[in-house]
Image (tube, grey):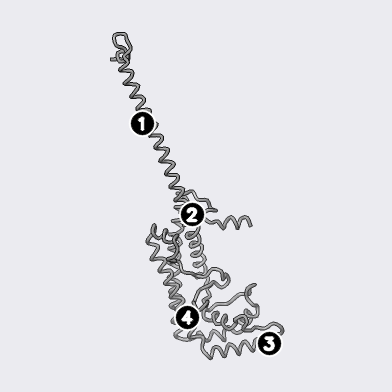
Amino acid sequence: MNLSDIFLNNGQLNWDAIGAISNIVLVTALVLITYWYAKKVSEQTDLMVKDRERNKILEEVQDFLTPTIHHLEKEIEYIQNNNILWSKRRGVGEFRPMYDGNEPIHRLFNTSSAVLKDVIYKYPELKSKFSSHDNFRDKLSELYAKIEKEVRTPEFEEQLRELLKRFNESKEGAKLDNSDNVERRIGYFIISKFNPERSTDSSEFLHDFWKEYRNDLLKFRDTTRIKEYDKEIEGTLSQLKELDEALLEKLKTIREEYRVKYNLTKYEINPKLREVEEW
């Protein structure tokens, strides 16, 4: 049977056959159009969902991942360079680098942060690592607080005041006085065991005093108990640094996966870059 046999019946057009085939063609066209339309709707829906996801991912990147990565990088640098000053604010011990007082070693596990909760929901293994980081930090603060109790004795206070008096008597003009909390700051120098550098935010007289009398004052650290604390601090800092490096690698991997999947620009990953470049 050929086409002429289908469309012709005794030399006349077979309208039934033509109608049936037309219906098939129309149905097929309708199915194809419906499929194409459904595909387009699905694509648009996927784009809308991905756009909403992208906004949420940007929050995770900008409000948590990038700041935490920066913090960990600085923290590793501080530990490597032994560039940490322990002090108290409102009675609470905290750690700050010697020459960059704007970024203390703070806690990473903030349970009130919605963004952090989102990240931990996706990567639950991070929760224990963040908690370990904060536990190391708290342990260090406890150890430095113990050293403070050992150092700040009546004998130490008396010796410090005597040295300050001797230093001031040897200077003309401006002198060191307690308006700058000199005694408290010098105590933190001894507890943290570091040498302050001359800088715009530090009194040059304080630097000169420390340079002249540091050995006399550091003798108050020379006790068996403080040496034991120092060993614990060294070991804890080493553990903290190792943990920081593992966390840093993990968070950078997560951020890079987001960058590729959601086509994030460097300015979206770190908005501060634009400010720096424009400046």
Q: How far apart are marks 2 and 4 (CA)?
A: 40 Å
Q: Are marks 2 and 3 in contact (CB under 8 Å)?
A: no
Q: Earlier in the sequence, mark 2 or mark 4?
A: 2
Residue type pointed to by label 2:
Leu
Residue 8 percent coordinates (x, y) = 31, 12
Mark 3 residue type:
Ser
Mark identifier at residue 170: 3
Write down the quadrant of residue 164 in the picture.
bottom right
- Give the Cα separation between the discs numbered 1 and 4: 76 Å
Residue on which disc 2 sits: 58
Residue type beneath disc 4: Ala
C-alpha separation, residue under disc 2 versus residue under disc 3: 59 Å
Disc 2 is placed on an element classified as helix
Residue at 43% x, 47% y: name it. 49
Q: Horizontal placement of 180 versus 114: left or right? A: right
Question: Regarding mark 1 in the picture, which secondary structure is present there?
Answer: helix
- Looking at the image, which residue sits at the far top? 11
Q: Which residue matches tag 4?
A: 145
Any mark on residue 31, and which?
Answer: 1
